[in-house]
Each structure stands twice: as structure tokens, then as C-alpha cells.
Image (tube, helix red, strand yellow):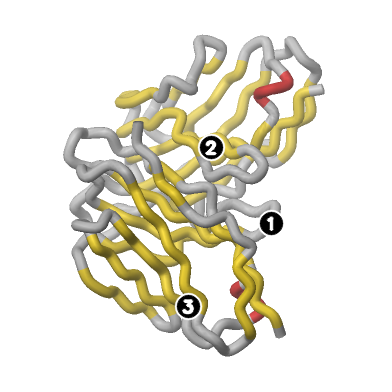
């Protein structure tokens, strides 16, 4: 059974600092990795996706992937109070035809003003 | 609005009743997904369609659940004989096939089901 693990938090970070969110996954066949942000009572909103080992940057967000360690992370620079939300890590195994995402439980991030 | 839409946004029903939810995907997306999310958990995959074909169903999708996408556009998810354990947010997402520049899943606002 595929598993995606995240620390549920809450993770408290001062405004302006770097927030670091981590995720590990069990299925070595996973090929695509996604970070979604979810505000309370709302649906998940895509932040970034990453397919290759290394770093991928988009504005204040950087996703990092290490397939050998089965580890993916999200860094948020210059954290803002509006970044306070639950961050969901999701993986997809595109090799076997199964296309549904497997999500972690999410990390609750609190940015302290 | 060109995003994924879902209807209704909220549904309250009594145990044993049948409910049906609708999802309209982003117009150019041919893949459509259903997920279920309970409090404190990430979304759990239920099923997905490519055009009108239902290609995968999770073991979570009991025989009380059925999904259709008859014309490859909108989809419906029906739950028969609802149980209190069915109370959850039901999320729909759509995407283009993998390999394209936009093979990511975009979620609708969800339908929150409460079974009394």
C-alpha cells in the first residue's frame, strides 16, 4: 500500500522566516510529486509540482526532490501570515497506469506575525 | 469561471437516503477524478475517468457508490443508502493526460456531505 508521510504539526514560523515542510513516500515507483495548499474549509490549491531530482523554484516557493531517499520538501521563503494553511504532499505513480494521487495527511503551518 | 465546479456545495441527508453530486471539469480537460476527504486527513482517491471511460476505482469505493461520466464532460457521483461514515468532503479534480505541460490535477470547491 502506498503511503505518504508528513508531520502533522502545527509548525510555527515567524513572519519573514523560511518555512520548511517535509514529506516521505513509500512507493519507489512514484514519478510525480505535488504540493497543495489547503485553507480551512476550502479545497486543495496547487502550489508546485516536481518530477526530477533536485530543486525547482517558483517565486517564494522551492520544491526539492530526492528519489533515492524517497523524500520531497517544500521551502517557503519570506513567510507571510497568508501562508498559514495546511500543506498537502501528494505523489502519483504514472508508470503503472494508476493515476490517482496519494496524499499525506498534511502539515498545518502557522506564520506568526 | 473556467475552473472545476461542483454542485451542490453542501448536502445534509438522513441515513439511508440516496444522494447525487455533480462535477463539471475544466472544459479542455479529459481526465476527471473523485476524492473523499475527512477532517484531519488528506484527500483519498476514489475513481477517475478518461473521457467517458472509468479507468480505475479504489477499494474505498464500495458497491453503494457509483460514478458516471456519460458524455465525457460532467460527472456524477451517487451514494446509495447513505451511512454516517459517508460524511465527508467529496472533491472533484480534472487534468490533461500525463506528459503534457499541464498534467496536474486541479480541484473544485467540493461538496460537503453530512449524514444525520
Above-or-below relation of A43 to B18: below
Circle 3: is it few (<14), some (14-19), or many (20+) Cα within 10 Å?
some
Q: Nearer the viewer, residue B86 or A76?
A: A76
Q: Which mark is residue A76?
A: 3
Whether residues under marks 2 and 3 lie with C-beta atoms below 8 angstroms apart, the answer is no
Q: Locate residue B51, reporting x and y percent.
A: 32, 33
Chain under disc 3 = A
Q: Name the residue under label 2.
A: B23
Q: Nearer the viewer, mark 2 or mark 3?
A: 3
What residue appears at the point 59 percent right and 74 percent down from the top-left corner? A83
Q: Do badges 1 and 2 share one subunit? A: no
Q: Is residue A111 left or right of residue B29?
A: right
Kind of element beneath mark 3: strand
Q: Do badges 2 and 3 share one subunit? A: no
Q: Mark 1 points at which residue?
A: A40
**Which quadrant of the rendered structure holds the N terminus of chain A?**
top left
Q: Nearer the viewer, residue A20 or A47?
A: A20
Q: Which of A45 and B84 is in front in this view?
A: B84
Kind of element beneath mark 1: loop
Q: Locate residue B82, reporting x and y percent.
A: 68, 16
Amino acid at each position: 500500500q502506498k503511503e505518504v508521510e508528513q508531520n502533522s504539526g502545527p509548525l510555527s514560523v515567524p513572519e519573514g522566516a523560511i518555512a520548511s515542510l517535509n514529506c516521505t513516500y513509500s512507493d519507489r515507483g512514484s514519478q510525480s510529486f505535488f504540493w497543495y495548499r489547503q485553507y480551512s474549509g476550502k479545497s486543495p490549491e496547487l502550489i508546485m509540482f516536481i518530477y526530477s531530482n533536485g530543486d525547482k523554484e517558483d517565486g517564494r516557493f522551492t520544491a526539492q526532490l530526492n528519489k533515492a531517499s524517497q523524500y520531497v520538501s517544500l521551502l517557503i521563503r519570506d513567510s507571510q501570515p497568508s501562508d498559514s494553511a495546511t500543506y498537502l504532499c501528494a505523489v502519483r505513480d504514472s508508470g503503472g497506469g494508476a493515476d490517482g494521487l496519494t496524499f499525506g495527511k498534511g502539515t498545518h503551518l502557522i506564520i506568526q506575525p | 469561471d473556467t475552473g472545476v465546479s461542483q454542485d451542490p456545495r453542501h448536502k445534509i441527508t438522513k441515513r439511508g437516503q440516496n444522494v447525487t453530486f455533480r462535477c463539471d471539469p475544466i472544459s479542455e480537460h479529459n481526465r476527471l477524478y473523485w476524492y473523499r476527504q475527512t477532517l484531519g486527513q488528506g484527500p483519498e482517491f476514489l475513481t477517475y475517468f478518461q473521457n467517458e471511460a472509468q479507468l480505475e476505482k479504489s477499494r474505498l469505493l464500495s458497491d453503494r457508490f457509483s460514478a458516471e461520466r456519460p458524455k465525457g464532460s460532467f460527472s456524477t457521483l451517487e451514494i446509495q443508502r447513505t451511512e454516517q461514515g459517508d460524511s465527508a468532503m467529496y472533491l472533484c479534480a480534472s487534468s490533461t493526460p500525463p506528459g503534457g505541460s499541464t498534467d496536474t490535477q486541479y480541484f473544485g470547491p467540493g461538496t460537503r456531505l453530512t449524514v444525520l
